[in-house]
Image (tube, coloured by chain):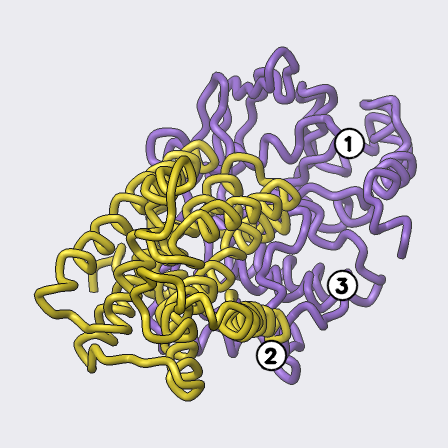
């Protein structure tokens, strides 16, 4: 087996286990998205009566936001995990081992992507049981997992960059502030056609909007000719967002490990 | 090649501060070499450069014949480095910690399993091998840390205060094993410690570094003979500090030590 692949594989397993421990820390990753989903889908159910609202129920419209929130919360602690490894010396333990340095970051990123995909599956099962539609079939599930995998890695790039650059848990923790604009300044509450002014422009500039729209299209209509471009654009947005955040993460990791 | 470590005018600067100032020495293969000095003298910085964790500002060094800046990967393959703090994953079991390090050093999974079992037995940790190490006592963590750096059977072992915080019985376990490693297995050991009795008992030769400069390198017997006293007297003679003050400084600098 190629050594880089072997090292990445074992570091992926380690990072995956690390992200699950301690187990009690997993609770908010489920509770917060479910809380937002239950509250918002109930509070705004009459929003669908607004002329021009495209979905049949607000629960169906809001369900993809729960998936996105789950990914935000699952991958948001990646930076903290890395800062912990740096501050307790574990990163030095890896640096002094004869491993390709890049395998340390690749293992971490793959674990983040895998966690995002698994969290998405669990949340999807919950949402469907709660009454959210999902018409895309198995192919759609795979696409949704692909999007979750890519977006999970892309989102973790912010925390990773700050962790490698600052090695400071408070600064990395405070990067959670990015969650608010990236999550709320989207079409999470209302369809794009109902937005206006500077807010609509900001929503259009936010890459997460396109990822959310792709997830929504998959859940409500599936991958059909009408939604194909929306879904494809979602993938492109996730990849471009990842290119920016992960380039920054790799660059800052090089500074740390130099 | 009879030298395990060769250091030539090794220098490390952090901004305008010189942590290690043109230090040179050699350590023959199989030697137990003590590297002593007051806090901030440059012991750990030297060790981190030799272990390829820090790039020297100037000078050169070879470990097992491999130059540390040009062929760091070859150096890493041949060394084990037990750092000042225990550097293991606290939310993983002893098994998980050892197996991961074993495979990262190129051992086959089966081989890593066998080696981990041996080391856990040796360090008297077999019964707790399945528990997360955050639940271990300080002594158990230290022993596991030492097991971790021995997984790949390194030729050169760097030990940065390996018995710090251990009770006498715990220190004895480590001493016995280190002595065996040095004498029977021919491993070269480069040790820093604040315990003068430890340096006196274990080390074939001792180097003392102060303010980044190497001030003396000699066997403990000859050092004691020269100064006409104990190793504590030797330390005071060459550094102007009492080693007990160094221990107090270390504890004062560590907020957890004060709490405990």
- From the image, which quarter does the N terminus of chain A lie in? bottom left
Mark 3 crowdedness (10 Å alpha carbons): few <14, some 14-19, many ≥20: some
Residue with the mark numbered 1: B39
Circle 1 chain: B
Mark 1 crowdedness (10 Å alpha carbons): few <14, some 14-19, many ≥20: some
Residue B151, percent across and down?
A: 48, 64
Front residue of A52 and B212: A52
- From the image, which quarter does the C terminus of chain A lie in? top left
Q: How far apart are marks 3 and 2 (CA)?
A: 15 Å
At a point 25% along the width and 59% down the height, the residue shown is A5
Task: Using the rendered view, name the quadrant where residue A49 is placed.
Answer: bottom left
The disc, 1 or 2, on the residue closer to the chain's N-terminal end is 1
**Which label is found at residue A222?**
none
At a point 48% along the width and 17% down the height, the residue shown is B58
Residue with the mark numbered 3: B138
The disc, 1 or 3, on the residue closer to the chain's N-terminal end is 1
**Which label is found at residue B129?**
2
The kind of secondary structure element at disc 1 is: loop
The disc, 3 or 2, on the residue closer to the chain's N-terminal end is 2
Task: Let me know if marks 3 and 2 both belong to one chain.
Answer: yes
Front residue of B102 and B259: B259
């Amino acid at each position: 087996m190629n050594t880089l692949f072997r090292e990445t594989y074992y570091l992926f397993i380690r990072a995956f286990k690390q992200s699950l421990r301690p187990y009690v820390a997993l609770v908010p990753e489920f509770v917060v998205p479910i809380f937002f989903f239950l509250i918002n889908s109930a509070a705004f159910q009459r929003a669908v009566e607004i002329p021009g609202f495209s979905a049949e129920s607000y629960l169906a419209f809001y369900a993809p936001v729960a998936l996105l929130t789950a990914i935000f919360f699952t991958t948001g602690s990646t930076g903290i995990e890395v800062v912990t490894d740096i501050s307790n010396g574990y990163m030095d333990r890896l640096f002094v081992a004869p491993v390709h340095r890049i395998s340390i970051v690749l293992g971490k990123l793959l674990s983040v992507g895998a966690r995002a995909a698994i969290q998405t599956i669990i949340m999807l099962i919950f949402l469907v049981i709660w009454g959210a539609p999902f018409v895309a079939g198995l192919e759609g599930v795979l696409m949704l997992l692909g999007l979750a995998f890519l977006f999970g890695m892309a989102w973790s790039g912010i925390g990773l960059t700050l962790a490698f650059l600052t090695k400071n848990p408070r600064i990395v923790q405070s990067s959670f502030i990015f969650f608010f604009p990236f999550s709320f300044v989207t079409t999470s509450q209302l369809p794009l056609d109902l937005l206006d002014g500077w807010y609509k422009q900001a929503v259009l500039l936010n890459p997460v909007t396109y990822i959310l729209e792709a997830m929504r299209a998959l859940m409500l209509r599936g991958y059909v000719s009408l939604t194909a471009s929306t879904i494809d654009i979602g993938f492109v947005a996730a990849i471009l967002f990842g290119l920016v955040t992960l380039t920054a993460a790799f660059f800052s990791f090089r500074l740390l490990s130099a | 090649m009879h030298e395990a470590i060769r250091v030539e005018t090794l220098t490390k600067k952090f901004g305008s501060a010189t942590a290690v100032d043109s230090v040179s020495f050699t350590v023959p293969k199989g030697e137990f070499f003590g590297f002593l000095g007051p806090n901030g003298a440059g012991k750990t910085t030297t060790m981190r450069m030799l272990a390829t964790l820090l790039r020297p500002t100037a000078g050169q060094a070879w470990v097992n014949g491999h130059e540390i800046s040009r062929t760091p990967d070859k150096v890493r393959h041949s060394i084990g480095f037990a750092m000042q703090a225990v550097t293991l994953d606290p939310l993983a079991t002893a098994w998980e910690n050892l197996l991961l390090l074993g495979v990262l050093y190129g051992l086959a999974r089966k081989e890593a399993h066998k080696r981990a079992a041996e080391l856990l037995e040796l360090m008297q940790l077999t019964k707790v091998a399945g528990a997360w190490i955050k639940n271990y006592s300080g002594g158990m963590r230290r022993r596991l840390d030492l097991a971790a750096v021995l997984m790949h059977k390194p030729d050169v072992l760097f030990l940065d205060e390996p018995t710090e915080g251990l009770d006498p019985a715990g220190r004895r376990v480590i001493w016995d094993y280190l002595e065996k490693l040095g004498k029977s297995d021919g491993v070269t050991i480069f040790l820093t410690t604040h315990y003068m009795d430890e340096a006196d008992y274990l080390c074939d030769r001792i180097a003392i570094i102060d303010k980044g400069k190497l001030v003396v390198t000699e066997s403990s017997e000859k050092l004691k003979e020269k100064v006409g006293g104990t190793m504590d007297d030797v330390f005071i003679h060459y550094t102007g500090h009492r080693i007990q003050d160094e221990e107090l400084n270390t504890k004062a600098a560590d907020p957890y030590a004060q709490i405990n």
